[in-house]
Amino acid sequence: MELNLLIGGEAGQGLASFENTLVDILSKLRFRFFATKNYMSRVRGGHNYHMFRISENPVHALSGDGWDIVVALDRESEQRHKPDLKKGGLFISLEMTEELNKQAREKYGRITAANEILSGVVLSAMGCGDGDIARIEGDSLDPVRTGFSLANKWDVADRYPLSTRAGNHYRLDGNQALAIGALLGGCQFMAGYPMTPSTSIMVYFAAAALELTVHFEQAEDEIAALNMALGASYAGLRSMVATSGGGFALMQEAVSLSGMTETPVVIIVGQRPGPSTGLPTRTEQADLNFVLHAGHGEFPRIVFAPGSPAEAVLLARKSFELADRFQIPVFILSDQYFADSQQIIEEPLDTGIIAREYNVYGSDYRRYAITENGVSPVTYPGLGDALVRVDSDEHDESGSITEDLNLRVRMVDKRLAKFRGIRDEAIAPTPMGEADADVFLVCWGSNGPIVKEAVERLGGEGIRVGGLHFGQVFPLTPGMIDRYGLHRRKVVAVENNATGQFASLLKRELDITVSGRILKYDGTCFTVNELCNEMRTYFRKV
Amino acid sequence: MVWVGNREIAWCPGCGNFPIRTALESVLKELPVPPQKIVLTSGIGQAAKMPHYLDTNFFNGLHGRALPLAVGIKIARPDLTVIAVSGDGCNYGEGGNHFIHTIRKNLDLTILTHDNKVYALTKGQSAPTTDRGTMNNLDPQGNENRPFNPLAAAIVMGAPFVARGSAGDPDHLKEVLKEAILFKGTAVVDIFQPCVTFNHINTYQWYKDRVYRLGKPLPDRYEALKTAEIWGERIPIGVIFRDEGVMPRQSDRIIFREPPEDKALGAMLSQQHFK
């Protein structure tokens, strides 16, 4: 049993506060849910909508099967979303919400009580009664009860009874997960220039700086942000930046600087539809090629693309360790859908902060000493007698500018030698569905949980299909996939872009030819239903 | 080829960078901190090669980006003495936005700019500080832009220490540099640097005929601004403005080698943890 809820209205009507109120209550009562939103790039007006899937089972995607409850705070929401109401579903009209607002004002003297009343309606629909809501504290309790009476009046009480709940869990949106992963990875410095959808990573980090020994610096532009992060990293702090496509475009030269000076940094790119300003508040996965090729010249890098908040915590944490170990830039590709989706994590999280070493060297220290694995010993200014001299020009082992062309070749070889170690560390993709199916869906980033549920749903219909979610998208190594025999199977790529960028990468890196591409680039995420329909069509054609 | 000690120097014989290097080298030796605790940041250009010719830590970064590097280093490590040194193209042109915003931060760091009023490494184009009417290969009919006044801009932006030195007066330059580096807060120093190859107007002699040393720094911002705008037959050098009353933004909080405690992070995470 599950309940799918949509609430739509204008920006400024309190949709976001309702989401926060409802997910807070759901979390306190340990219900399983997934919440995401679709909003326009404006402060007031327009048409925004927030979607909730509350279920007895773990849920990490939108089902796409229609809505059990639609709440319309304006006429446009009614026109757009009422047609997707399931048969027998409840439509809460503008007039009904006005009744709700009236009660909030008259009974509680504050309009925000309307969020709690509406949450009460939803809870009652989920089968909650007075006995279930003891964990809700303070001023919210009575408005929730008022919601119960409204649910009775509207005849929706107990219509979607959810009997099982989660145990101990975390509730995170994608950006919180990335920020927490960064803190666990020992990141102590972040610089940034606000840009949707990555701003809330900065907000979280700035809040963390009030409690923890970390620093957030707002930069004058993205160019400064990445240069500041590289300065802090050189000086001895694990550092990161977060941005989106346009801001990342400004960071290009400093990405290359990280590669040349071998200064570790983690760069989070929250994708949104381009080119250029595109659709600033919507979602897409079209910057994979951009990140793969970012920065002039040749230097090693790693690109991660987590699919769930738990994986985001894990991979963000790992990013700092790997950036440091190989002295390289490590990228994390996220997107608006992932950033803005709140969900619960039931698996245990490793919440220990990664410790690091600070080595001390003498006056004969050379920052770019040539080693077999390409990694030179690192230290920081002011530790011991070493001088730490780093240069964006080609340089000798001591960091001095050089135009010795033989040395140039040795330095290129040294930097690229790190790829060997990086490839050995590659993180294998996560398998889904039937391991021996003839057809395999491949995906990366935020599509992971959507594809997983689609594969399971198709399996339930007797359609045998397997799947792989790539949390690491670069480098790709044969060892990551050899057990799946992908060369013998039909591979279908699922991506939120118009050209199938990951499919092309699979061909280039692993010589895997996809037989189908399921692509979506209208600025919204896939739903499970949508993906299943695409696959049923695919199977009819094969 | 020009050598200083065992180092080959990439500057032209007679370049204004040499006396600046000598002055800076002797100041660094006189500072109460060891070279391991000093970091120079620089961008790209002939001036930006300065750190290579001194015995300290350095991060020679990208064109125009010496300042955000310095900001990151200083915030990460308040215990280090941080000096950004680059040319006028780097600090005022490509990095002009950083010049404005780094001053706003008022961290305890020093911004040195070798001002030769020409793009020399690319063989002679107009710089932000090039006078109007100057002709070169990209301005064949004469530069039409008004020159940037870095000292006036710095004063207007609220820099608490603003000074000018000249490679033609190395003893005075050394005193200015020392005062700037020891100053607690953002210190901005523009340094006249004759370019013997591409600037045949602003020569050593041209400066010698015009430059005069200022006495005590002016405590009043608006008087200092007037002084910063003096240009022509008489050009002042020295500390134009010095405001002791502005505390640098830098806190004493040391986070280097002080990672967050698991417990503190755990307390933060508990806000997202539901039992």
Image (cartoon, coloured by chain):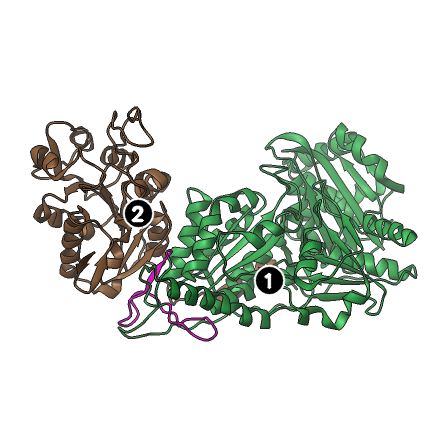
Chain colours: A green, B brown
Query: Percent from the top left, x then y, of residue A51?
Result: 74, 45
| Quadrant of the image containing the N terminus of chain B | bottom left
Residue B143 appears in the rendering? yes
From the viewer's perspective, is B232 left or right of A252? left
Write down the residue under mark 2: B45
- The total of numbered circles placed on residues is 2
Which structural element holds mark 1? helix
From the viewer's perspective, is A516 left or right of A341? right
Residue A493, by quadrant, is: bottom right
- Whole-number angstrom distance, CA of label 1 to CA of label 2: 42 Å
Estimate how packed mark 1 is, as few (under 14), some (14 to 19) or many (20 or more) residues with alpha carbons within 10 Å. Answer: many
Residue B99, by quadrant, is: top left
Q: Is residue A370 magenta?
A: yes
Q: Residue A502: which numbered mark, if any?
A: none
Write down the residue under mark 1: A313
Q: Nearer the viewer, residue B20 or B136?
A: B136
From the viewer's perspective, is A417 left or right of A405? right
Q: Main secondary structure of the magenta part?
A: loop
Write the residue at 13% across / 47% down: B173
Query: Percent from the top left, x then y, of residue B157?
Result: 29, 36
Q: Is residue B85 magenta?
A: no
Write the residue at 69% across / 54% down: A504
Contact (Cβ within 8 Å) of mark 1 with mark 2:
no
Which structural element holds mark 2? loop
Chain to which mark 1 belongs:
A
User: Label 1 sits on what residue type?
Assistant: Val
User: Label 2 sits on what residue type?
Assistant: Gly
Which residue range is magenta in the image? A368-393
> Which mark is nearer the camera, 1 or 2?
2
